[in-house]
Structures are given as structure tokens and as C-alpha cells.
Image (spheres, rainbow, N blue to C red):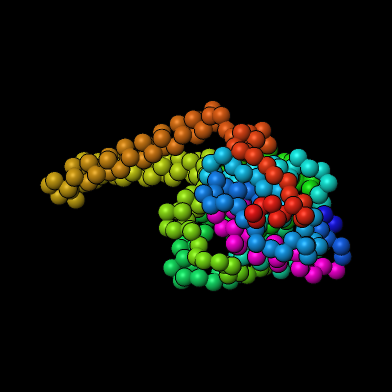
């Protein structure tokens, strides 16, 4: 079995060296070899791999794809998947981070699930997340908001196995330019989830801060932007209808009953009119946002990814020392 691995890297070359070490020593019940596609996401530090290349046995090749600028984690993955799609010899593609949080030791279980479910994309479902309680709490809140706004459930990240037959359609989907996990949850591609704990980082601390986390969460929601806008339109319509009925009720009480208190009717009606106008405004904005996004030109990774690639270096194991120099 020949597996392509796509992993984005931004300055974290020490972690990549440790990842190579773990990948090359994985134990499989059958012959498995890897081709590693490293997407250099505009790193400011020189790319160096510190690993004794003479003992490589599972890693058949390493290709460094250098991007012209820092596109971000998700878009770097999309570019890497397009690079793999150009090759036809791979049986499957593994997408994973290079920092150790996606554990290489889980790859055999993911590949086993792929064999048991032909044609399915296998995703690593997180059960335990080591780290700050604040981050875990934020993630729970994010999942709740995501479900509320989109109606979909997202409980996995980038760590997954994509069968060869599913790759072409995936890289042709514009949504993957924003978020891989969000694209998989929305697509009609059948998914299988395999429980896998998140590992600990090889080196240093995560570069993700609160702003990065929020942007990452919004990028997943962007895949469902039209769904979110339609839901907002429906909510605005319901709010406007309830508010209009409230205004009619206030007028009815004022004109046809003796319950009116001087001043309360006009104040209540004025407040309800403001809410009604806000609901109508939200409805209008949502409608025009949908129309605008439907007419905009989108980035299709299969077509546009090459525009962001500065250079590519295919490194066989014997040539890895050139990268380290």
C-alpha cells in the first residue's frame, strides 16, 4: 500500500523531523510506504530536517511545496491535496498536522477503517484533548454555536484518510479553500469516525491564540455561509411576524378595551416598531448577502492552487541531507 501524507508546516521544522522519525518506524501488518508532501506555508525560518536519513525504510520520498506567502493552515492543506491529486499511484491520502497533536500511531487504525469501509473518508474523532480547560470550554461552546447556526455536527479536525477515488471531487470543491472538516461535513461523501485522542506537541507551544481560534471557527462556518444566511432570514421573518402581531395587539388594546394606561401604548408600539424594522433589515441584508456570494468568483483549489506555489522540491531519502545543509 502506498500512502501520501499531506502536512502543513510553518517554521516548525523540529517537529517535522520528529514526525518523520515516528512515521518511518510505524509497525504495520503489511507492506506500507509513505510519500510525504510538506507544504511550507510561507515560513520565515529555513527548512531543515534533522534525521538520520540512511535508516529510512517506510518513507519513499519527501516533497517540499513552498508557498509564495502564508495562506493559513487550511489553505495550505488544500494546496497539498491538489499536489497529491496530480499523482495517480497513491492508494489513499492522510492529512495530518506535523506538530505531534495528530498521532502517527493512529494511522494504522485509520487505514484499517478505510479497508473495512471502501469509499468512505475516515476521520479521527477527538475524545480527549490535553491542554487548558479554557480551550476545551471554548471548543464546547463553538460546537454548540456551529450546530445552532448550521444544523450540522462537527466533531473532528483535519486528521483523516481520503481514498484515492474521493480526492478529485474534494479538491474541486471551492469550500475546501476555507475549511477541510467543514467541507467534509457538508459534502455528500460518506464519513466514518474513529475515536483518537489528541497527542501532545513535539516541540514548544501552540501558535494558536484566541484570534486564530476564532478565525479557524469562522472558516468552518464559512462553508455553510448560505445555510447560515437562510436561517437568519427565517429567524428575521419570524421575529418580524411576532413583532407585527404585537403591534396589532397593542393597537387593539388601546382602541377597543379599557385597559390602556396613558403613555404605555405609544411607548410599547414604538419599541415594537423598532424591533420590526431591525428584523426587516436583517432579512434584507441576509437576502442580498446570499445573492452577492452566489455571483462572486470563487477559488477552486484544483484550478487555482498552482498560482500560490513558489517552488517544489522532490527529495528522495538520499537527498534529504541537502535540505538539512
* Left or right, residue 46 beside residue 288: right
Relative horizontal placement of residue 272, taking residue 44 as reference (left or right): left
In this rendered view, identify the residue nearer to me: 89 or 255: 89
Task: Look at the image and tell me whether residue 264 can be seen.
Answer: yes
Instruction: State whether residue 51 is above or below residue 185.
Output: below
* Along the line of sight, the residue nearer the viewer: 249 or 156: 156
- Residue 13: percent from left, percent from top: 59, 58
As drawn, 87 above or below 7: above
The N terminus: image quadrant: bottom right
Residue displayed at 54% across by 72% down: 130
Q: Residue furthest right?
A: 30
Q: Position of residue 210 (x, y in %)?
A: 42, 58
Specify whether residue 78 is in view: no
Specify the quadrant of the image occupied by residue 285: top left
Depth order, front residue of 85/8: 8
Q: What residue is drawn where x is 46% and y is 34%? A: 289
Indicate yes or no whether the magenta region holds residue 271: no
Write the start and end of the magenta stretch as one range: 4-29
Q: Position of residue 113 (x, y in %)?
A: 78, 62
Quadrant where the image shows the C terminus: bottom right
Amino acid at each position: 500500500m502506498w500512502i501520501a501524507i499531506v502536512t502543513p508546516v510553518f517554521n516548525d521544522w523540529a517537529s517535522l523531523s520528529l514526525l518523520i522519525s515516528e512515521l518511518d518506524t510505524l509497525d504495520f501488518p503489511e507492506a506500507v510506504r509513505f510519500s510525504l508532501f510538506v507544504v511550507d506555508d510561507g515560513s520565515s525560518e529555513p527548512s531543515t530536517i534533522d534525521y538520520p536519513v540512511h535508516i529510512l525504510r517506510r518513507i519513499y520520498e519527501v516533497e517540499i511545496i513552498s508557498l509564495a506567502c502564508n495562506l493559513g493552515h487550511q489553505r495550505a492543506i488544500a494546496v497539498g491535496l491538489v499536489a497529491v491529486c496530480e499523482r495517480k499511484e497513491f492508494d489513499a491520502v492522510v492529512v495530518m498536522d506535523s506538530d505531534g497533536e495528530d498521532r502517527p500511531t493512529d494511522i494504522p487504525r485509520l487505514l484499517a477503517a478505510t479497508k473495512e469501509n471502501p469509499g468512505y473518508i475516515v476521520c479521527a474523532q477527538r475524545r480527549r484533548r490535553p491542554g487548558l480547560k479554557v480551550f476545551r470550554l471554548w471548543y464546547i461552546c463553538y460546537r454548540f454555536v456551529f450546530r445552532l447556526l448550521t444544523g450540522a455536527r462537527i466533531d473532528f479536525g483535519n486528521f483523516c484518510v481520503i481514498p484515492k477515488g474521493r480526492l478529485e471531487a474534494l479538491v474541486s470543491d471551492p469550500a475546501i479553500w476555507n475549511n477541510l472538516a467543514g467541507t467534509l461535513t457538508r459534502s455528500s461523501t460518506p464519513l466514518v469516525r474513529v475515536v483518537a485522542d489528541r497527542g501532545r506537541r513535539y516541540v514548544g507551544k501552540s501558535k494558536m491564540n484566541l484570534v486564530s481560534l476564532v478565525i479557524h471557527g469562522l472558516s468552518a462556518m464559512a462553508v455553510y455561509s448560505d445555510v447560515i444566511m437562510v436561517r437568519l432570514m427565517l429567524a428575521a421573518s419570524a421575529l418580524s411576524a411576532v413583532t407585527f402581531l404585537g403591534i396589532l395587539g397593542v393597537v387593539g388594546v388601546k382602541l377597543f378595551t379599557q385597559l390602556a394606561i396613558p403613555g404605555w401604548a405609544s411607548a410599547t408600539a414604538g419599541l415594537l416598531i423598532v424591533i420590526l424594522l431591525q428584523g426587516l433589515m436583517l432579512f434584507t441584508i441576509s437576502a442580498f448577502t446570499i445573492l452577492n456570494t452566489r455571483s462572486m468568483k470563487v477559488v477552486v483549489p484544483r484550478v487555482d492552487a498552482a498560482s500560490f506555489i513558489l517552488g517544489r522540491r522532490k527529495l528522495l531519502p538520499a537527498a534529504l541531507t541537502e535540505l538539512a545543509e
